[in-house]
Image: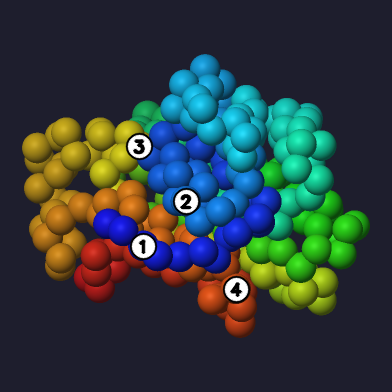
Amino acid sequence: MYYEHHRYIDKVCVVTGAANGLGLSLCTRLLEEGAYVGALDIEGDTLKKVFAGKEDRLLPVEVDVASKPSVDAAINAVIERFGHIDVLFNNAGIIGRQSLLDSTEEQWRRVIDVNLNGTFFCAQAVLRHMVDKGIKGVVVNTSSVASQIVSPKTGAYSASKGGVTMFTKFAALEMAQYGIRVCAYGPGTSVTRITDGTRNDPDRCAMFLRNIPMGRFGEPDEATSVALFLGSDEASYCTGQTWIEDGGNTLF
């Protein structure tokens, strides 16, 4: 798809989970729209590879969002390079596929640590900066259709994304007094690495498609468009909501 947008000219944006999937799509679109980008991911070598040659407007930073010290160091690196941050796209996430009875403590904690605690650590670091500098910025969290409906063996993921949706409401309420918006978007099953386990399992894939009225999985660019709208001035009166982008999956 081609979009003629210039909503992010000279805006400084941070994208977590930037090395692949929706994060990679977000970084690519932000650069096209004129932004400076801090691209954060735990896969540091992949970041350098996919963004080679774009270092004039993009800073790749290796980070583990589940670690507060790692997050604080990464956010400080972006501020040191670009001077400030206008928008955070809080996108990093993982999925686990274990049943309730079989899930180990370590498996449960890792999903919650990355998806929910990571969202909190990144948002807190950026929001403290925005409040301190008087920046009326935006945080866009990546929730999921899984915050609204559940599927087998994704309990930790659904719990974490439900937490992201409620954290978004809480943060929006507290940040409104500073002129800062906090929104979320909830992609359905998009064609990304995180959904390989569903799309490559014939039975599971068929089950998901039966429950999507549009009859197909979403493309990364479609989810990215929702996130970019929420992070832009076009959504200037939107805060606290989670916009579901799912091909109609939650109609059932």
Q: Earlier in the sequence, mark 4 or mark 3?
A: 3
Amino acid at pointer 3: Ile
**Residue on which the image places disc 2:** 32
State if disc 3 and disc 4 touch (CB < 8 Å): no
State if disc 2 and disc 3 touch (CB < 8 Å): no
Q: Residue at x 15, y 34 (%)?
A: 201
**Residue on which the image places disc 4:** 233
Residue 97 left/right relative to 55: left
Amino acid at pointer 1: Tyr
> Of tags 4 and 2, which is closer to the observer?
2
**Residue on which the image places disc 3:** 194
Report the Cα–Cα distance between label 3 and label 2.
Answer: 25 Å
Report the Cα–Cα distance between label 4 and label 3.
Answer: 30 Å
Amino acid at pointer 4: Asp
Judge whether 157 appears above or below 11 on screen.
above
Report the Cα–Cα distance between label 4 and label 1.
Answer: 16 Å
Name the foreground residue: 176 vs 211. Answer: 176
